[in-house]
Amino acid sequence: MAIKLSLQFKLLIAVALVIILALLSLAYLSINSQKKLFYESFQDLAITLAQALDAGISSEAELSDTSKLQANIYKMIWLNSDITKISISLPTKNGLKVVVSNDTFLVGSLAVPESISSYRKGVILTRTLIEPDGTEVLRVITPVHVGGQRVGIYDIRLSLDSLEKVISETQRQFLLGAIVAILVIISALFLLMRITVINPVKNLQKGIKMIGSGKLDYRIRIKRSDEIGDLASGLNEMAEKLKDKTEALEKEKISLEVKVEKRTEELQGRINELEKLHKFTVGRELKMIEMKKKIQELEKKIKRT
């Protein structure tokens, strides 16, 4: 059995889908834009940290004081809870090596290829990665500068947990706001459609049924200067024309009945005359036959005599 959906319900579904798609698209763009801003702010933070570390190094000779560098690293981590790791790599005979880090296991190891590329080109490199413990971090590799010269590389990692929390909270708030907005918009559209579309359409349906049942004096009372108003005017005009044609046909029918009755009377008169003529003719023929018989009888009598 087919389910019959009302026009109002179909319109609400269509509008709701459009609104939901629009809000989802807006949410996607907003969240991506927010992520980009956060990544850029974290990158700027890492560069600021590197500049702060640079400010604490006045000469290349201080780079050999690993205890001071280590203290500066721990101070930075203590001041900013988003920092998970800071390493400083300096060039040696064997290549670029990590000289200080809050992760002591990295001290003495060769720098990663990205650090070597950043050191040679003097550019800042950033990318996100997942730590062994599952933490998503933003890795920023930026050159160490002393007296305007590149002397090494900072490898700074910032936890993105706070970013994910902010994004999750934003998504939750946006979802709640979107649900409220959809309910409010649908409610407003429901009332608006009832006033502007559904009720006028029901009036049109009622008018069509009344006119279709033969009540040609019925008129649809919709005074609007739009398509529905034009349709109501058209139906009223059609009903008026049908009424005029029906009345004309009725008059023609009555006139025809009068003509038929009159013609019938004329034909009946002709029939009566014909019947009279027929009776007269038949009677005359019978008399002629009798006269012939009598003449024959007389002729027979004359012959006998």
Image: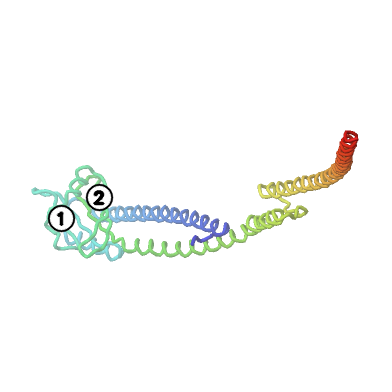
Residue that sits furthest to the front in the current view: 305
Q: Position of residue 200 (x, y in %)?
A: 67, 56
**On residue 142, which mark appears?**
2
305 or 117, which is in the foreground?
Answer: 305
The residue that mark 1 highlights is 98
Q: CA distance from mark 1 to mark 2?
A: 14 Å
Instruction: Label 2, secondary structure: give it.
Output: strand
User: Which color mode does the image show?
Assistant: rainbow
**On residue 163, which mark appears?**
none
Left or right: residue 100 compared with residue 276:
left
Residue at 45% across, 63% down: 175
90 or 170, which is in the foreground?
Answer: 170
Q: Position of residue 62 (x, y in %)?
A: 18, 55
Evaluate if marks 1 and 2 touch, with contact meaning CB atoms under 8 Å apart.
no
Q: Based on the displayed image, in which of its 4 quarters is residue 187 positioned?
A: bottom right
Q: What's under tag 1, amino acid-wise? A: Val
Inspect this view and state whether residue 269 appears: no
